[in-house]
Each structure stands twice: as structure tokens, then as C-alpha cells.
Image (tube, helix red, strand yellow):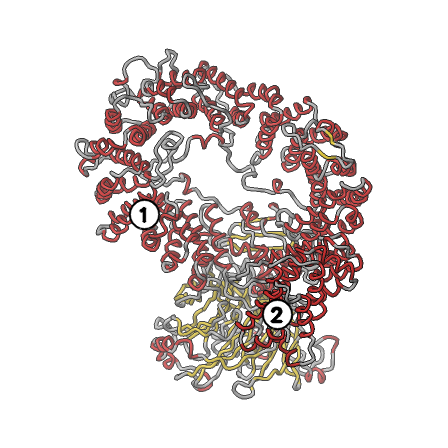
Amino acid sequence: MEANKDNANPTILNQSDLPSRRSDSGVKKRDDGGTGLFDSLVPAYTYLNDPFAQQASSSDTDDDSVEEIDEQEIYDLISTISDPEHPLSLGSLAVVSLPDIHIQPPSSPRSPISTVLVEITPTITHCSLATVIGLGVRVRLEQSLPPRFRVDVRIKQGTHSTDEAVNKQLGDKERVAAALENGTLMGVLKKMLSTCE
Amino acid sequence: MSTSAPPPRELTPLATLHPPSTSRTWMTSPHPQLPMVATACSDKTVRIYSLTSFTLLSVVSGGHKRSIRSVAWKPGTRGESVLATGSFDASAGIWRKYERNAGAEGGVVRDEEDYTDGKGEDGEDGDADGDEDYTFSVLLDGHESEIKSLAFSPGGNLLATCSRDKSVWIWEELEDDNFETVAVLQEHEGDVKCVAWHPNEELLASASYDDTVRLWREDLDDWGQCALLSGHGGTVWWVEFEGADMLGAGGMFAGEGLREGQRALLEERERAGPRLVSCSDDLTIRIWRRIPKARGESSRGPNGVPSILRTSSIEEEWVEESQLPKAHGRAIYTAAWSKKTGLIASTGSDGKIVVYQERWKSGTSDTGGPSATSEVNGEAMDTTDGTPLTPEESWKDKPLTEWVVVAEIEGAHGVFEVNHVCWARRCDKGKRSSGEEVIVSTGDDGEVKVWTLNG
Amino acid sequence: MSDIQLYLLEFDKDRKEASSIAAQSAKRLESKELKLLDLIESLGEYISHDDTATRAKADDHDVIGSYAKGLLALEERGKWDEERVASVINALLDNTHALRNYKQQSERYPVLQLIDTLMAKYRNAMKSVHDSSPQFMSRLINYFEGEKDPRNLMIVFSILKVPMTEWDIGSDAQDLFEAVFNYFPITFKPPPNDPYGITTQDLKDRLRDCISSTSDFAPYSFPALLDKLDSTSMNTKRDVLQTIIACVKDYGPRTISLYSVTLWDALKFEILNSEEEDLAQEALSGLSEIARSLSQASTGALNAYLKPIAKECNEHLEDAPTKQSQAAGRILGAIASVSPEVANMILRAVLPTLFTLYQAADNFPKRRGLIEVFVQLIRADLQVYGEWRAAPAVQQAPNGDRTSSADLAANNALLKFTDQALEVLSTGLSTVPVKEVSFRLMTLDALLQLAKVRQLLAPQEIAEIIKLFHTIVITEESYGNDELKAASVNGLVEIGQQKPQLIIDHAFPAFMAQLPDSDVDGSTTYVSVLEAFAKLGSERQLFETVVLRLRNKFNVAVQQQASVRYLRAILSAILFAFAQGANNLQGTPGSCPYYNDLILPLLKQSSGARETRSSLFEDEGVLDLIGRLSNVVLRTQHLEFQKQIARETYTLFRTGPAKDLPPFGTDAPTTQGRTMIVSTHVLAALQREAKPVDDINELLTALVNFAMVDSLSPKVRAATSAQVSLVVNKFIPTAELKAVTGTVLYAPTDLLNPANLTINSIRTIFAIIKGLVLRNHTTLTTIFPSLLALLSSPEHGTTVARGFSTLLQPDDLLTKENHCTISGLRKQKAFSLLVPNISTSVRSATDASTKANYLIALSGILRWLPYTIIEPEISALSPLLLQSLDLPPEEHEVKSATLDTLITFLTQNPRAIEEHASSLITRLLATTSEKRNPAKVRAAALQCLALVPGQLRTETVLPFRKQVAKRLMASLDDGKRAVRGEAVRCRARWMGMDEVEDEEDE
């Protein structure tokens, strides 16, 4: 059964090299540069929150600040999908990577529609599973993103022998819809998507 | 050069058919006589709504194992309604329901007649006898994979179906519930997305994933491809013929004072017959016209084939006449051509509904007129300088008509994609004129919305 | 007519009669009237009787069975001699049909028992039968052939195991092997309540024992097993691998050496292209078992095995980092950890290539991949050569002579590579750009492992590594989530466990140098250094020094008027070190470690008993830390010692009487009020017998009055409440408790009187009751009703309601360590006294606000109760909990508590809320889509909702599927990332539970 794998021996990236929200420079650190090691010394349930006090102000203060859906969030959604051939994640196989995820804001002020473009890079140029992988990515995003997002999944230019054909399939809403009603195919997808975080 | 000014007319929501489906709805088809529509749902059902009360009359279910992608009413039925359903389960179904007041002669409907069944109590009935009223009578088996579209011929005796298996099938109904396959057309090189019949010829059009539109007709007793329309740069999602006799008194181009060129154009159209509209992933909507068979002179056609042979051949020559102004940002799923007004409505993945109108190009009257643009002047000079143009040439080089956007709405179904629009007779009490039409849109949100066109 | 014939004839007519005949013949046997031989012969002739009628009987009825039973009975009556055994077994094999002809399991079973007994008790007899008759074995095998019943098979296997292990079976080996291997891989499903309790595992084990029983099987077993290894069934593969391991263990080195390479060629695939991790594990242990077995044989055999492995692994290393290069690392690691000898061989065979590849590598991922393998090798080496602090069990070398761990270390093949390794790794760690996180983490780990290997590195070399690590902690700019800094600190701690002195000599000075005397410049770089330092302090041998250095730094900082923030940080570091409990604080009646040089000065400074009272000690944060520090040190002290300190609880060594000081002097200046924070922790540390004052009742009253002062800061107020609870719980004898608390709760102080309610009084009420609840005191039965009555107070009802969440809330002061009485029954009691009462009141409550208050109170109790206590009331409580989700957004505390409870219900006992499914789902949807609920509530609602599809019956939930999926689209667009994350998970669960798919797809 190993023999008929398209790529039996893929290159594997290390977890700590994969982009993560905490490791992108944008995040705000503790202002004292510490790790908060000492925070637990004074238990939270003593002085800090007083059950008797008026609770009108909700516990998490910056609750009204909105965290927009960004490329990293998209990445976190799809990098954990597992490859149909290996017990490995698309992220660690570099099939999906942060720079290849693009969010386009609404085209006009009147339009509510944003677009997500994900370019995937198959582990090898003739990977017959490219379509399945792409489908997995599209399905994960369509199920996980609010409907105001349009999802476009493409094979990255020149990384696949038949990328145009694959792109056309992945772009075809009707085919995708039908695929999701195909029990056998759904079986494969379920397995890929079972890793939710 | 489409004008950037806001469109003159306005699409306003009239109603959302209630209750909506909880899952994606694909397309909606108005009943040829009765004030109701049938909506194809991904939950394997068809929902029948009233256009008078805008409420659900019945849910047709139990016939299919997968999404129902497409529905079509059989035209000209008497005393009953016949519904065809095409499903992702690769089969098509035929459903029948007895109708007290359907099937006026030749399916021509007198207004007061449907007004009566528009009182809404019909709706009550519909709900009362619930889902039993439509009975599943035939299962059409043969396609290898999902059926994507189906259509009854104007006569109602032929049913065309098309599928991901790249084939188009034509079924003939010999007598009730006995369908025979009369043709399996396999020239397409990709999924066949849509089929549509010519309003008064047995001419079938099909649109495909292979970026082409193909036309088919019967040659002796064998169906074959009679034209290949290529030009689109992506999947062609929808194809539809223009209504018959759109040039008659009712037509937008009626009236005196037409210049010679314009009259020539109309005559040409008379001979060519209804045109074809197609829309595609490539974000264009294209109008195609037939080159009428030459009478006598053998100059036309590639390398002057003798005319005698040509007449017997089913070969037809269709050319792209024009493209509608680009108004969509994502794949266009439907372009619906009103059989009453000649307006075209389009919609697609960007959730917009756009309405277009064809009109004489301004400034093509002999007197340039104050509104004349430099370009018009340029044209005027052409006509005035020594070489007079024959009418035909003149409108081939410089089209006399143009399509303009007359109405447009963003997010017609909120943030959701809109899969389909069609024109239907307006039947609710708010109807402003007997001929008034509404636009019915069908969306991923499971909602079917009815729109009026104002101004 | 022989007894047997009689027996058989009777058998039809009258079984009683029959068995009595059997018994008779048994007697006559004993009395030697009847020769067993005749009996057997008569049976033999019977079974091969010409008269088919009688013949038939023998087959129809369980003749043979009862016959065997008979013989078993006989055998029990006395030992048989060899020829009797022989005749019995021969009679069976010659005169009776092979067992497969008897349809009834019950019929075959006794026969097998009989033979099993013979095998067990009469080994030599049976063996000599075998030796004397060459056909015996094949007859025996043939006799059992086709047995299918698990009960019988268990016996068959154990019967056959005897010849396999004890007899010389030369020519019969193959037949014998096949006789059992036919059953491989064996499985069966025991009937629902199988009376015999035989599991598939039992069968597997017995079968495996047979296959691995003798090396004579090797020529047949290994090919057969490897053939089955190609199966697509994971279970079969698992079986095969486990059986191979068993064979490798049992067949012995000589045999294994013949198959080692063949096995390697087969097993490696399970690791290089692993599909299932556990199969890879089995394969790995298989490979190392082979090595282990071979290292008992000649070095040549071992070499022959390891050579091809090293060769292939080296090849895989060339294209690191790949799935297979990782696998190669695992293989080498697993094998190398078998024995020092094997480790040396592997290291010598692999490391040269590894380093060459490393030098040639042009990118970091590749280098990382190589070092990853290196680390696995060092870990293996560490395993066989031991750590500095723990020498390995003394090794038994193949040639039999024992080597002391010292000589052993001298043979460590790794020694030859350390210079090269250190060079490569050090430069890798120190010169490579910070963004190469995984690469540097890997090099760091490699260095750490090297440093741990017993007697591998010289102290100076380890010191260099320490330097590398602390430089990263101190000077490197922060990057990403600072995995590297964290790893460095942990590295230092680990080295500290091995070589504490080296850490003290090299890391400490570096760290201390980073700690300013004062932080006037306002920089906070010291924080990460303090954290690292504190972590080191948690290591036993380092604790002493760490605390000493930090204390000195603290004193200097105080003199230099450093910022409060800096002092807090230093104190936190000290407290952390203490809290890790890395040290022994046990003192004597007269003395207490760290008291004089650490605690006492701090207490004096905080109270101003020292003239040099710096304003720094007015900071509540500083005081709190000082308090906690004192608490940690004091609470374990001897009663005698505590008594001395107890006196100073409130004076804190100030001169002058306590009565002017808080809590006694209610009008004391706020600066003094603050010392309540410290005294609280001291009070907490005291044992019951070490009273802070003589008249406890007076103290309680004082505290209650003090608590009423409006000007108290939140922290001082909380401290006061805590003291109230402590006093009630610890210092008032059970007998007086009712009276004493009574005077406060009721007249004269009369706190519980609705007329007297203020926010301060309410706090105090709950502080008192909390003390009682923990003691589980009887007066609660009278107090709780009055307390519940307050819930209907229009003005204070809500405040009271919120108080209920404090009663069972875990508390860091009221603990057993602090000598409090913590009744095991308190939760059960509180539940039974409050919950039924509340739930009836909710239903009866007329006005909305009272109803709400009851709901708030209810969730305040439930949130702390274990499921087992709530269980009986679930069905009554569920509707109430659901209602509390409708409370206004500001009650988010209640809501999250409720959601937690609902989550427990759903996981523990979904049936109980099944009936409420509809209202549960709709309310959860409402809660999560209500934007005014805080994010954590919206998220919790989603977590709860996500459990529904899995926990409730599908037919109950399916109708809601579409609606939920649709409603959740809104949550997918929630403003908060965390909530969206939950929404995704929740929605996936709901979408996942689709209707049964029809599988007729092409």
C-alpha cells in the first residue's frame, strides 16, 4: 500500500517554524517582557475579582475591540488539515503557507463581500490528490468562515502539472456541492478534517 | 464605455417566499399558467410557493437521493401540473398533480382566471393536502452522474437533460409516463451545465464546463450538433433564447422614423429569429445571433460551398453579436431574458442582481443632435464622405444598438450567493398592470425573493 | 457384557442408572476387580463395533465425553503408572474418532481435559510414548485438528505447548507449527455475557506462546509471519509484530542471528512509512529486541545485524528533514539504547556521516533534521551510560566480566565525537539568526543532553554550555513566543540537577549582574532574569543560594529606594522559590529556618517597627507578598515557636498595645490599616492552639466592627473578611461557636436583620458563614433559612445572591495547610441545606427580581459542587439552569458558571437533559449570539452546544441540525477570535452528524 503513494517521503517542517499567532511580531507582549511566571502566586479568586461588586463592566475589559479575521486565522484553520496520504498536517508539509493566503476586502463600499484566496502547493508536481486536498481546504473554509467570505482555492502556479484543470474544478461551486454529497469522497474529507485544532 | 451614472430604474424587494428552506436553494421555475413557482432545493425537495400569497403551498419530496438541482414545468398541460426534477443522484423525475383550474386553452392564461386562484385559499388547499398532492410518476434513468439542468420543449413533448457526464439526453414522451430516449448528444468535452429550447423551433442549446455553447437539432431522424459557439473564457453557466416575436408591435424597437439601417437590422433579425444569451465564469454575458441562411447568392459561408447542399445540411452559423456591460465581480450563474419586455436580468456569485436593456445607440440618427459625442461625429463623417455604406455593413461595423444597465442591486440575498433569477408574471394584489413582471431570485441562503422593477 | 456396554445401553433408558454404573466400575477399578486396561479395551472395541446400531450410539451421545469424565474421576483417585497412561492415550488416538467428529463442544471438552491432565501430570510417560512411537505426534495433532471452540482451543494450545517446549520434535516441527499457526491471527467475539470469560487476548497469548515456544519453528514461523505482515488489516499487523517480538525473545541469539537481517528488511517498512504510530512502536521494539538478543551472542552476529541498518539509515539522513530521515533517527535511537556495546557500534557507524552531511548541508531545515537524529542518539547514549547524578545499573558485558560504571564511561564511543559536536552545536546556537527557532531549539537540546551524560564532558565544557544558555536568557532580544529563552532556562535547571555547583559558579554571577540595585531608569529587563533565577531556585541544591542572593538584592533595593514594582518582582521570585517547596522548612520549638534573617526583618519593616520604615512598605502588593512569604515559612513551624509569634500577629513587633491598632482601633490611620494584609497571612499560618489574642470573641467583634468601616481599601477589606472566616473556622471551639456567631448574626449585632443590611455587613455575613460551612457546623441549619430570606430584599437581594458563590469557593487562605477545619461533607451539606430550598423558591417566587436572585444564588452554589453531589437533583435543576441563561448580560459570572454545570451534565448524564433538548439548544444559541454577553460566555455557550450532538440521542438532535448550522454562521463572524474558534468547532460537530449517507458512489 506504500508503493502506490504519490509521495512516500515528503519533506517535513518543524512545528516551531510554522507561523503562529503568538510568533508573528504583531502581537503585544507583556509590557514587563516576562512570561507571567509569578502571576499565579496570588490566586485569581482572592482579591482580584470581588463577587459582591457591581459586575456591570464585563470581566474581559477590551471586549468591544474587534479582532478581524486575518490571514493567520485562515492559516490556523487549514494548516491543521491532515494530508490524505500521511498522518501529517498540510502546514508541516508546507502544502499551505501563510504568504499564499490573501484576503481581499469588499470591492465596493456597498458590497459586503470579502474574498479569501488560498494557493496550495502540492508536495510533488504530479500529486493526484491535489484536487482532494484543495477540496478539503475549500470545505474547511466554507464551513468555518462567515458567509460574507467567498473562498477561492487554487494550485500555486507552476507547482502542479495540471494546475489549470484542478483550479477549474475547485472553482466550480456546483461540482463542489455535488462532491459533498458523495459518500466515499466525504469519507476521505472527514478523515482529513477530523483534526479541528 | 458604459455610463457611470446611477442606473435609471430601481429593483425593490416585494416579498420573500415564506417559509424559506433551511439549506441552499438552486433555482426557481414559474408555472406556465398558475401563479406559483417551484424551487429546487439541496435538501432533496422541491418547494412550491404561491405568487399571490407568497407562502409555501407544498413540499415535493421522496423521489431523489441527492440534491435536486433543477426543476421544469411541462408547458400546455390540461387539468394537471407536470413537474420535472433533475437531481445530483443522476436521475430525473416526473411528478403530476391534478389542478382544478389549470390548463386554459393552449396554456394562454386570462388574468381574471388566475386572479381567482390568487385569492390565496388555493394556498390553504395546497397546505391542506400537503405533500401528497404531487405524485411521483416516472424516474428517468441513464445519466452516469449529476443532472445539472433540464428543459421541456415548447411543445412539451420533448424533455432535455444534461449532466456532469458531458452528455445531453433528449427524451420523448410517447404517451403519459412513457418516455423514450431519442438522442444522447456527447460532443461536449466537459459537464453540461444548462439546456434551453428555442421558443418556436425544435432547436436545443446547451452550455458547458468546456467553455462552449452548442446548438442541436434533428437531422432526418437523428439529432446532431448544428452549431458550436465558442468565445467564452470560462465555464458557461447559463444559456437562454430570446422570446419569440420580440420585434412585433410590442417590441422596444417599434415606431416610425426608423432610419434605413435600423429597419434593415430589424428585418435581418426577423429572418434570423430569436437570439441567444449566455453567461460565464469569465464574467461576461454574450448575445449570439444566427446568420440567416442565404437565399440564393452563394457568396456567404466558408469557401463558397454550393447552396443546394447547404440547405439540406443542419449546419447553422451563429456569431457573437455583443457583450453586455460588465457588472459582475464573480462568476455569473444566470442571465434571464424576459419574453415580455426583452430585458435581461443577471446574477451570480457576487450576490448582485443586474438588469440590462437594449436600445438604439444615441446619435445614430442622421442629424448628429446636441447630445452627439465626438465619436458620433466621427461616424457622421463616415456616412457623409463619398463611400455610402450598405445598411448591413453599417450595423455590422458599428452596432446600432447597445445594452445598458437599467437597474442593479448589491447583496440581493445579504452576504449569500445568488444562484438563479427568472422573470415571472406578477400575481399579487399589488399588481400594477396586467402584463407586469417580477424578478424571482434564488439564493444560497435558502430564500426565494421576489423583486419589482420600478421607474 | 462389559461395564461400558452396560453403561451405554443404560445411557438411553436412564442416565442416573448409567452414571451409577460408571461409579461402580470406578469402585471395581479401585478394588482392582476390574482392570482399567480391560475397560479401555472394551471401550475401544465398542467404538469400532460391527453392530452399527450400538456403534451409532457411541457417536450420537456424548459417550466419549462421559467416558473421559469417568477416567478423569478415576485419575483423581490415584496416580497412574506409565503403561496405564500409555494405554489410555493410545486407546483415545487409536480407537476413537478424531475429535472433529463429535459435534458437541461439551463432548470434546472432557477429552481435551483428560489429555491435558496426562500432559501435565505424566510428562515422562507421555514423552516416552512419543519417543517409542514415531507416528504419535502426527496422530496427536490430527486428533485435535479442526477444533474451533475457544474454550477447547485454550486447552489444545496448552497441550501442544508441552511437546513444543520439552520434547525432541525434530521431524514433527513443521506439522506441529502448522497445527497452531493455522489459527493465526486468532480472533473471536465472546458472547455478550460469556460465562467462561475467555477473551481474544487469552487466545492470542496462548497462541503466541506456542509459536515462540521453540527455535525449531524459526524456519517456518518467520517466513509465515513476515508474509502476514503485508496484510492490510492493522490488527493482523499488530498481532504479527507482537508475535515476532515474542519469538525474538524466546528463540535465542543463535537462531535470531540467522534471521536478523531478513527481519530488519521487513520491520523497517513499518517505521519508514508508518501509517499507525503504535505499529511503528512495535516494529521499533522488535528491532531493539533483536539487537538485545544478539548482544548476548558473538560481536560478529551483532555487527552483521547493525551494518545494513547503519548503512540504510545513513542514506536516509542524506535527504533530511523527511519523514524517513526522522524514522531513521528513531530506529537508530531505539537500537542504540539496548546496551553500551550496541550504542558504541551505532555511534561509530553513524556519527561520522552525520557530521559530514551537516557540514555539507546548505540550509537550516536540513541541519535541524540531522541534529534531531543526533539528539536521539545522545538520549540513547544517556540511557545506557547514565546521567551524572544517577549511574546506570552495573552492566554485564557479553564476555561475562562486570565493568564498573567508571570504566564503562571511559568506553563511551561518544567521547571521540564530543569536541566536534560541541564545536558544531555551540556555533549553531550562538551564531544562527534568531528566526531559525526549531534549529536552535534542536541544537540547544543536543547540548543539554550532552551535558547530562555521565562523565562525558569536562566541567569547563559544561560551563561553556551554561554560558551559552544564560546569554540567551539575558541578552538575546525577545522573538516570537520566546521558545528559546524558555528552553534555555529549563536547560539551566536540568543542568542544575546534574551539576549544581557549576550553575552557582557560572550562571548566578551572570544573573545577579543583571539585577540592578535600583531600577530608577524604569527598565523592566530584570523581570525575565528574576523569573529564570526563581526557576533555578526551585532546584533543591540551588535554593539556598538563590534565596540568599535575592534577599540581599532586596535589602539593597530598599535602601536605594527602588520602585515598588521592582520590590514586588524580587519578593515574587523569593516566594516562587519557596512555593516550589524545594527546601525543608521544618524547624524546632525554638527556631525556624529563614525566620531571623528573612521573615522577621520583613515583618518589622512592614509594620514600621523598624525606624527605617520606607514608604515602599505601604504598598499593598508588597505587603501581600511579605504576608504570603511569612505564611509559607511559618505555617509548618512547631507549635511552641508559633505561640511566640502569635502574640505579634497584630502588633507585628511594634511597641505599644494592640488595642490601638486595627482591627481593635477602628479609627487607626489607613497606613496602619494596611498591615491587616500582613497579619491576615500570619493569622492563617497559626495552628488552633496558637491564639493571636486571649479573648477570641473580642477579636471577632473587633473584626466585625472594623469590617464596617467604609474607608477600607478593597484589599484590606478582603483581608478583614478573610480574618473573620479564619477566626470562626479555627479559633472558636465548637461548643461556643453557636453562641459566639449568634451574637453577631443575630442580636445584639443582628447582621442578618434585613433592616441592617449594607454591602459591608453582607460581606461579613458571608465571611462568617464561610468559616462555618468549612467546619460544616450544625448552626447552619438555622442560619441558611434566614440568609435565603434576604434574597427577596429589593435593595440588597442581588448582592446577597452574588455572595453565595463565595461560600464554597476554593480559597488560598482557608486551607488544611493553614490548619483550618475543612469538612469533607461541607459540599454535600451545603447542597442539601440550600439547593432543594432554592429550587422550590424559584418556582414559587412571584416577582422577577427575586426569582433572578434565587437563580444567581443557585448557580453560585452549583458551580463549586462535584457532579456526584448534584446528580440526584439534575432533572429538577436543569430547567432552572436554563432559565438562568436568560438573566441580563451583567450576570455573566452566573452564566459562565451555569454553562460549566451544563457542560458537566452533558458529559456525565446527557439522558437527564434529553427532555430539555429544544430549550437547551435555543437558549445556547441565544446566549452565544447575544453580543452583550462577554466573549468567554459566548465561547462557553458554544463549547456546551458542541457537546449536544455527541451526547444527546441523534433522533433528538437531528431535527435541529440545519437550524443550528445556519444560526451559527453569525458566531463564525463574532468579534472575538476565541469565540470564532469555538464556533468553528461547534459547527463542525453539528455538520458532522449528517443523515445516513447512501454509499452507491462510483
Please report the residue visible at 71 percent of the width from the left and 45 percent of the height from the top: C289
Q: Is residue B117 left or right of residue B32?
A: left
Pick whichever, A134 or C120, lies toward us: C120
Which chain letter matches label 2? B
Where does the image place residue C61, in percent across and percent down from the top left?
60, 74
Locate residue C652: give its quadrant: top left
Q: Which residue is mark 2?
A: B164
Residue type for callout 2:
Arg
Pick whichever, C969 or C760, lies toward us: C760
Q: Which residue is mark 1?
A: C888
Q: Is residue C973 left or right of residue C494?
A: left
Using the image, determine if residue C596 lies above or below residue C831.
Answer: above
Pick whichever, C627 or B102, lies toward us: C627
Where does the image place residue A195, in percent across and percent down from the top left?
56, 52
Q: Is residue C97 visible?
A: no
Which chain letter matches label 1? C
Using the image, determine if residue B440 lies above or below residue C848.
Answer: below
Where does the image place residue C33, in percent across and percent down from the top left?
63, 66
Residue type for callout 1:
Pro
Disc 1/disc 2 C-alpha distance (Å) = 54 Å
Tag shown at residue B445: none
Question: Which secondary structure, mark 1?
Answer: loop
**Mark closer to the observer (1, 2):** 1
Q: Residues within 10 Å of mark 2 (few under 14, many from 20)?
A: many
Q: Residues within 10 Å of mark 1 (few under 14, many from 20)?
A: few
User: Which residue is the extreme one toward the bottom?
Assistant: B175
Question: Which secondary structure, mark 2?
Answer: loop
Pick whichever, B280 or C710, lies toward us: C710
Please report the residue visible at 29 percent of the width from the left and 27 percent of the height from the top: C712
Using the image, determine if residue B269 lies above or below residue B209.
Answer: below
Q: Is residue C975 visible?
A: yes
